[in-house]
Protein backbone atom coordinates (compact mmCIF):
# COMPACT_ATOMS: atom_id res chain seq x y z
CA UNK A 1 0.00 0.00 0.00
CA UNK A 2 1.26 3.47 -0.91
CA UNK A 3 0.52 7.06 -0.02
CA UNK A 4 1.72 9.46 -2.70
CA UNK A 5 0.91 13.13 -2.24
CA UNK A 6 2.07 16.25 -4.02
CA UNK A 7 0.65 19.44 -2.56
CA UNK A 8 1.33 22.86 -1.11
CA UNK A 9 0.32 21.98 2.45
CA UNK A 10 2.69 21.36 5.33
CA UNK A 11 3.53 17.67 5.73
CA UNK A 12 1.49 15.96 8.47
CA UNK A 13 4.27 13.80 9.87
CA UNK A 14 2.24 12.40 12.77
CA UNK A 15 -0.52 10.92 10.61
CA UNK A 16 2.03 9.43 8.19
CA UNK A 17 4.03 7.79 10.97
CA UNK A 18 0.84 6.47 12.58
CA UNK A 19 -0.13 4.90 9.23
CA UNK A 20 3.35 3.38 8.79
CA UNK A 21 3.19 1.81 12.28
CA UNK A 22 -0.18 0.07 11.82
CA UNK A 23 1.03 -3.31 10.52
CA UNK A 24 1.92 -5.58 13.47
CA UNK A 25 4.13 -7.85 11.32
CA UNK A 26 6.49 -4.97 10.48
CA UNK A 27 9.43 -4.53 12.81
CA UNK A 28 10.92 -1.50 11.08
CA UNK A 29 9.75 1.97 10.18
CA UNK A 30 12.30 4.26 8.54
CA UNK A 31 11.55 7.88 7.71
CA UNK A 32 13.36 10.69 5.95
CA UNK A 33 12.38 14.35 6.07
CA UNK A 34 14.05 16.86 3.80
CA UNK A 35 13.89 20.60 4.38
CA UNK A 36 14.82 23.75 2.51
CA UNK A 37 18.26 24.78 3.70
CA UNK A 38 19.80 28.20 3.48
CA UNK A 39 23.55 27.78 3.74
CA UNK A 40 25.19 28.31 0.35
CA UNK A 41 23.35 31.25 -1.16
CA UNK A 42 21.30 32.41 1.82
CA UNK A 43 18.11 31.00 0.36
CA UNK A 44 14.94 32.73 1.50
CA UNK A 45 12.58 30.29 -0.22
CA UNK A 46 12.21 27.76 -3.01
CA UNK A 47 9.36 27.69 -5.48
CA UNK A 48 8.70 24.25 -6.95
CA UNK A 49 6.80 23.70 -10.17
CA UNK A 50 5.67 20.38 -11.65
CA UNK A 51 3.29 18.68 -14.08
CA UNK A 52 0.81 16.76 -11.87
CA UNK A 53 0.10 13.65 -13.96
CA UNK A 54 3.70 13.26 -15.14
CA UNK A 55 5.18 13.71 -11.67
CA UNK A 56 2.69 11.37 -9.97
CA UNK A 57 3.46 8.69 -12.57
CA UNK A 58 7.22 9.03 -12.00
CA UNK A 59 6.84 8.87 -8.20
CA UNK A 60 4.65 5.79 -8.50
CA UNK A 61 7.24 4.17 -10.77
CA UNK A 62 10.05 4.92 -8.29
CA UNK A 63 8.07 3.18 -5.53
CA UNK A 64 7.37 0.25 -7.86
CA UNK A 65 11.12 -0.12 -8.49
CA UNK A 66 11.79 -0.09 -4.73
CA UNK A 67 9.16 -2.80 -4.20
CA UNK A 68 10.84 -4.96 -6.85
CA UNK A 69 14.20 -4.72 -5.03
CA UNK A 70 13.22 -4.96 -1.34
CA UNK A 71 10.56 -6.55 0.81
CA UNK A 72 8.66 -3.49 2.01
CA UNK A 73 5.08 -3.12 3.19
CA UNK A 74 3.99 0.51 3.28
CA UNK A 75 5.45 3.50 1.49
CA UNK A 76 4.57 7.12 2.16
CA UNK A 77 5.98 9.69 -0.25
CA UNK A 78 4.91 13.31 0.18
CA UNK A 79 6.47 16.17 -1.76
CA UNK A 80 5.55 19.82 -1.43
CA UNK A 81 5.26 22.26 -4.33
CA UNK A 82 4.68 25.98 -4.56
CA UNK A 83 6.56 28.43 -2.37
CA UNK A 84 8.42 26.81 0.54
CA UNK A 85 10.38 28.96 2.96
CA UNK A 86 13.85 28.18 4.27
CA UNK A 87 13.81 25.63 7.10
CA UNK A 88 10.38 24.25 6.11
CA UNK A 89 9.88 20.60 5.15
CA UNK A 90 9.89 19.81 1.44
CA UNK A 91 9.79 16.00 1.22
CA UNK A 92 8.90 13.00 3.38
CA UNK A 93 9.66 9.35 2.65
CA UNK A 94 8.53 6.66 5.06
CA UNK A 95 8.84 2.88 4.71
CA UNK A 96 7.57 0.03 6.84
CA UNK A 97 8.93 -3.49 6.49
CA UNK A 98 9.63 -6.62 8.45
CA UNK A 99 13.35 -5.79 8.69
CA UNK A 100 15.31 -2.55 8.97
CA UNK A 101 17.79 -3.33 6.17
CA UNK A 102 15.07 -3.32 3.54
CA UNK A 103 13.47 -0.18 4.97
CA UNK A 104 16.75 1.77 5.09
CA UNK A 105 17.81 0.72 1.58
CA UNK A 106 14.41 1.44 0.03
CA UNK A 107 14.24 4.88 1.67
CA UNK A 108 17.69 5.83 0.40
CA UNK A 109 16.92 4.47 -3.07
CA UNK A 110 13.65 6.41 -3.32
CA UNK A 111 15.36 9.68 -2.33
CA UNK A 112 18.31 9.18 -4.69
CA UNK A 113 16.06 8.37 -7.65
CA UNK A 114 13.56 11.11 -6.78
CA UNK A 115 16.32 13.77 -6.67
CA UNK A 116 17.44 12.79 -10.17
CA UNK A 117 14.34 11.60 -12.00
CA UNK A 118 11.24 13.29 -10.57
CA UNK A 119 10.15 16.23 -12.73
CA UNK A 120 10.22 19.06 -10.22
CA UNK A 121 11.67 22.44 -11.16
CA UNK A 122 13.11 24.55 -8.34
CA UNK A 123 13.61 28.29 -8.30
CA UNK A 124 15.63 29.78 -5.43
CA UNK A 125 14.80 33.15 -3.97
CA UNK A 126 17.83 34.80 -2.33
CA UNK A 127 18.58 38.30 -1.15
CA UNK A 128 20.26 38.94 -4.52
CA UNK A 129 17.43 37.60 -6.70
CA UNK A 130 15.97 34.42 -8.22
CA UNK A 131 17.60 31.57 -10.12
CA UNK A 132 16.68 28.08 -11.27
CA UNK A 133 18.44 25.29 -9.36
CA UNK A 134 20.65 23.04 -11.49
CA UNK A 135 21.17 19.32 -10.89
CA UNK A 136 24.10 18.53 -8.60
CA UNK A 137 26.87 16.13 -9.54
CA UNK A 138 26.71 14.62 -6.04
CA UNK A 139 23.06 13.65 -6.63
CA UNK A 140 23.94 12.06 -9.97
CA UNK A 141 26.80 10.14 -8.33
CA UNK A 142 24.43 8.85 -5.61
CA UNK A 143 22.11 7.52 -8.31
CA UNK A 144 24.88 5.50 -9.99
CA UNK A 145 25.16 3.06 -7.09
CA UNK A 146 21.63 1.78 -7.77
CA UNK A 147 22.00 1.09 -11.51
Image (cartoon, rainbow, N blue to C red):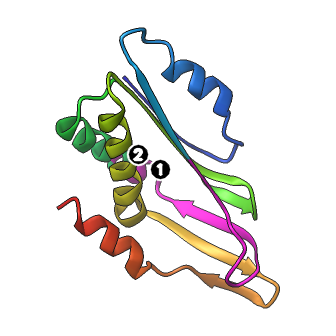
Which residue occupies the foreground of this view, 83 or 36? 36
Q: Which quarter of the figure has residue 40?
A: bottom right
Report the residue marked by disc 2.
56
Q: Is residue 77 visible?
A: no
Image quarter of the N terminus? top left
Q: Is residue 140 left or right of residue 14?
A: left
Assess whether mark 1 and mark 2 are in contact (beta carbons under 8 angstroms): yes
Residue 49 within the segment the image draws in magenta:
yes
Disc 2 vs disc 1: which is toward the camera?
2
Residue that appears at 30% across and 47% down: 62
Q: Position of residue 21 (x, y in %)?
A: 51, 18
Q: Secondary structure beneath disc 1?
A: helix
Q: Secondary structure beneath disc 2?
A: helix
Q: Position of residue 2 (x, y in %)?
A: 40, 28
- Find residue 139 and name its label: none
Residue that appears at 57% across and 70% down: 122
- Find residue 52 and name its label: 1
Image quarter of the C terminus? bottom left
In this view, 9 is above or below 85: above
Q: What range is drawn magenta here? A: 33-57
Residue 32 within the segment the image draws in magenta:
no
Crowd around label 2: few <14 · some 14–19 · many ≥20 (10 Å): some
Q: Is residue 128 left or right of residue 6?
A: right
Amino acid sequence: MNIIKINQSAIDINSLITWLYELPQDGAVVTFMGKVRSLEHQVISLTLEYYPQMTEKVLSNIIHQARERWSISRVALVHRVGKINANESIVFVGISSAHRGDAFAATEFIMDVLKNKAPFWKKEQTASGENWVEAKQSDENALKKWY
